[in-house]
């Protein structure tokens, strides 16, 4: 569950009891997930602008995975983890150059966005982490192409490219065990119909990743919270 969608502790706790983990983008969100009873091994730390203090906190807590946005963050994480005698499970966030979303400001997958690295850069960083950085264990790749997505076609296009990246990295001798496929399905506001359902999304993902042999992760948020909330003032 993407905690940023609604960080109310009761909401997080309800979803944790149903078996969900927490996708977090700050120390505060990690603390909220823990307070709501989410075990550290079900917490992913994502997002741009992670501070050294936040990375250190995530390491001390023992989160399941840190999704790394760029080379400076990867190097900082490795140094902090090595200083603690740890090696942190990580994924490299890739920009698949496929944008989607209900508004330009929530379209995170196009080529010149600030999120993630290119496919060529991902391969280089994966090799750097595996061969030269003792504080990180690269175990997978991640992407997130936007929010409020009402058409599965761009998602499928991005996920096909991500599958190709996994296969390419493995061909280079890299260990790739995890694939985080981000992007949020659209909320049917105002009685809107014809939007893809979670079942439609799942069928598409199963088709695209068939036989790939990875552990899949997803971080829906607003589709869950947006359909269930009211604003009281």
Image: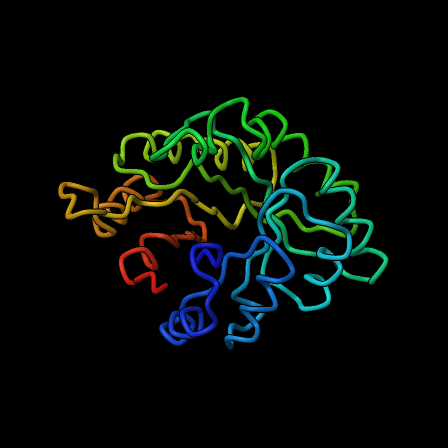
Left or right: 41, with 12 as reference point? right
Q: Residue at x 61, y 37 (%)?
A: 173
Q: Find residue 195 and report its horizontal and vertical position in percent.
A: 19, 42
User: Which corner quadrant holds the N terminus?
Assistant: bottom left
Q: Using the image as rendered, state which of residue 108 and residue 141 is in the foreground.
A: 108
Q: Position of residue 69 (x, y in %)?
A: 63, 39
Q: Nearer the viewer, residue 116 or 178?
A: 116
Residue at 43% in and 72% down: 16
Question: Horizontal and vertical percent for residue 34?
Answer: 57, 72
- Say which residue appears at 56% left-offset and 34% top-offset: 115
Horizontal placement of 129 versus 23: left or right?
right
172 shown above or below 58: above
Image: 76 above or below 122: below
* Quadrant in which the C terminus is drawn: bottom left
Q: Nearer the viewer, residue 43 or 226?
A: 226
Q: Position of residue 154 (x, y in %)?
A: 33, 30
Residue at x-position 21% and y-position 43%: 196
């Amino acid at each position: 569950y993407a905690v940023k969608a609604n960080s109310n502790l009761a909401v997080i706790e309800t979803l944790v009891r149903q078996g969900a983990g927490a996708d977090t983008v700050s120390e505060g969100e990690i603390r909220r997930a823990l307070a709501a009873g989410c075990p550290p091994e079900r917490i992913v730390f994502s997002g741009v602008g992670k501070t050294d203090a936040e990375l250190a906190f995530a390491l001390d807590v023992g989160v399941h995975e840190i999704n790394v946005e760029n080379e400076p963050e990867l190097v900082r994480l490795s140094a902090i983890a090595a200083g603690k005698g740890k090696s942190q499970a990580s994924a490299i966030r890739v920009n698949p150059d496929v944008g989607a979303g209900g508004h330009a400001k929530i379209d995170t997958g196009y080529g010149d966005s600030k999120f993630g690295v290119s496919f060529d850069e991902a391969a280089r960083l994966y090799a750097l982490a595996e061969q030269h950085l003792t504080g990180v264990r690269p175990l997978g790749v991640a992407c997130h192409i936007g929010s409020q997505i009402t058409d599965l076609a761009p998602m499928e296009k991005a996920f096909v490219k991500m599958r190709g990246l996994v296969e390419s990295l493995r061909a280079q001798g890299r260990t790739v065990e995890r694939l985080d496929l981000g992007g949020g399905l659209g909320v049917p506001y105002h009685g809107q119909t014809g939007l893809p359902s979670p079942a439609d999304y799942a069928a598409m993902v199963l088709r695209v990743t068939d036989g790939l042999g990875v552990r899949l992760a997803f971080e829906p948020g607003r589709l869950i919270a947006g359909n269930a909330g009211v604003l009281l003032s």
